Structure formats: C-alpha cells, structure tokens
Amino acid sequence: MGDFKHKHSLGQNFLKDKKVLIKIIDSVDVNEDDLIIEVGPGQGALTKYLKLFHANLRCYEIDTRVKKYLDSFVDEKTEIIYDDFLNIDIKEQIKDIKYKDLYVIANLPYYITTPIIEKIINAKVDVKAMVLMVQNEVANRLAAKPGSKDYGAISVYLNYYFNVEKLFVVNRSSFEPVPNVDSAVIKLARKDKIEKVNEEVFFKFVKDAFAMKRKNLRNNLKKYDLEKIESILNKYNLTLQDRAENVSLECFIDIVNELSK
Ligand code: SAM
C-alpha cells in the first residue's frame, strides 16, 4: 500500500485477506461471456481475483490516485472508468458490450451502500446476481426475514427482486486501514419469477407500513382502506395490531393488489 493516504470520506478500507477474496469469487459462477461490474476497485485487491473469471469487466472508481495500481488490469475485456458510480448511466455504459449475464461484485464504499444498490436496481439492467461486501449490521437489515428486528422496508424491497442471503461475516482486521465495524458479504440472486404488482404503489405502501417502526399497522396505514388490509392480513394470521416487521413479501403484495382492485 506504500505511502498511499486512504480517504476515509471515500470509504477507502482496502481488503487484504486473500481467504476472504477467494470466498467472494467462489460464491458466484461467472463465465467468460458474462459481464462483471465492480464498484470501487481501489488498489485492485478484488479486481485481481475477478480477472480470474476472464469475463468482461467494468470497474468504476472515483479516486484517480489509484490509477497506477489499476493500469495493469486493463486489456481488451477490462476497462477502468474513473467516475462517480452514482453519476453514470449504467444502461448507456454497457449497451455496446456483448455479454450473457450481468454480475455486480464489489467491496462497497459504505457511505453510499444503499444508493448504489438502488441505482443498480432502478437501472433495470437485469443483474443475475450481486455479491457485495457491506457493513455487518447493514447486511443484517438487507437480508432480514419477517419477524426479525432487522426486517424493514429495504429488506422487503430487495426481496421483491432477489433471494438475499448473508454469506459470511468479515472481521474488521481483514481491512487496511482497520475500520470501526465488522463487515459481511451478501449475495442477491435474481428471482426467476417476480410477482405482479404495481411497483410504485407497492414500494410506497411498504415504506408507509414501516414509517414508525414501533407503531402497529393500524397507526401507520391510517390513510388506506383498513378493512381491505385487514381482510388480507387475516389470511396470513395477522391483524392491524401487528407491526410491519411481521408482514411477509407475499402478504404485502396481496394487500397492494387488493387495494388496487
Ligand atoms: N475494492 C477495493 C478493495 O476491496 O480493497 C476497495 C474497496 S473500498 C471499501 C471502496 C472503494 O470505492 C474505494 O476505492 C473508493 O475510492 C471507491 N469509491 C468511493 N466512492 C465512490 C463512488 N461514488 N464511485 C466509485 N467509486 C467510489
């Protein structure tokens, strides 16, 4: 790492544990005719392992100071783009690349974990799977199941598109510099079939249901037709006295479809 001055403001905690890097690439099946997007290659710790897939690779890095570490990765299938990932047009960027399946594999800059994931989903680029290193407590929320205290609107949102799984925890000592928190790797695998629902209404409804985490559904959903909502909740052995943290994705979808009738 030499005399490189890590920028805390850019979430620059570089991975130095080979075992973790191997576990990350072992968690996903990428073929030569696929495309991998890496957000934040940094000094290339993960990029080096992603290259082993011999797939098309596009890496987006905001900090041009790492160019000297990344130049050697560039070849006919690999491009490093120095830009803010949040500012790029993903669809536009990859439209000329011939690929079969798209993967996003990254050790994310933690200050923008959710905006990055949302950007990828909203780009509608049909990602087959994402394998992402995030803060451990964020991983718990993203992969939470109904009934857990970590289950929230973001868990439902991701579960709508993906099967979300927390793969393993990564101790803070695996990074340079050592951050204040532990991390975890999660895998989001695209669902074969996505349920039919008006997405705009659905996401708004889920957000409203979780608006006040400690309040029950009756209180959070006052502006909706509570009778209709209760009729569906009952099918799932729930009532308006329950909290949103007990409502499964299927139940949320059923409710929104009932409300849209
Ligand atoms: N992949 C490297 C590794 O595993 O060692 C670095 C990971 S580090 C946690 C996050 C990287 O994201 C840093 O290199 C940082 O400069 C970069 N980054 C931060 N904000 C970014 C943004 N908006 N767009 C692209 N890259 C960004």
Image: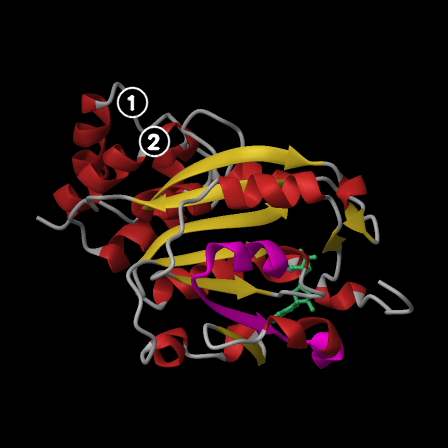
Residue at 64% across, 34% down: 169
Residue in front for this viewpoint, 210 or 147: 147
Q: Mark 1–mark 2 contact, CB under 8 Å?
A: yes
Residue found at the far left of this picture: 261
Can residue 222 be seen by looking at this rendering? no
Residue 45 location, x and y as percent? 68, 57
Above or below, comparing residue 184 to residue 161 in the picture: above
**Residue span colored magenta:** 47-67
Q: Where's ligand 1: which quadrant?
A: bottom right
Residue 226 as seen in the image, left or right of residue 93: left
- Label 2 sits on residue: 247
- Label 1 sits on residue: 238
Residue 24 location, x and y as percent? 56, 44
Residue 18 location, x and y as percent? 70, 44
Disc 1 or disc 2, which is closer to the eye? 2
| Three-letter amino acid code of the residue under disc 1 | Leu
Can residue 25 be seen by looking at this rendering? yes
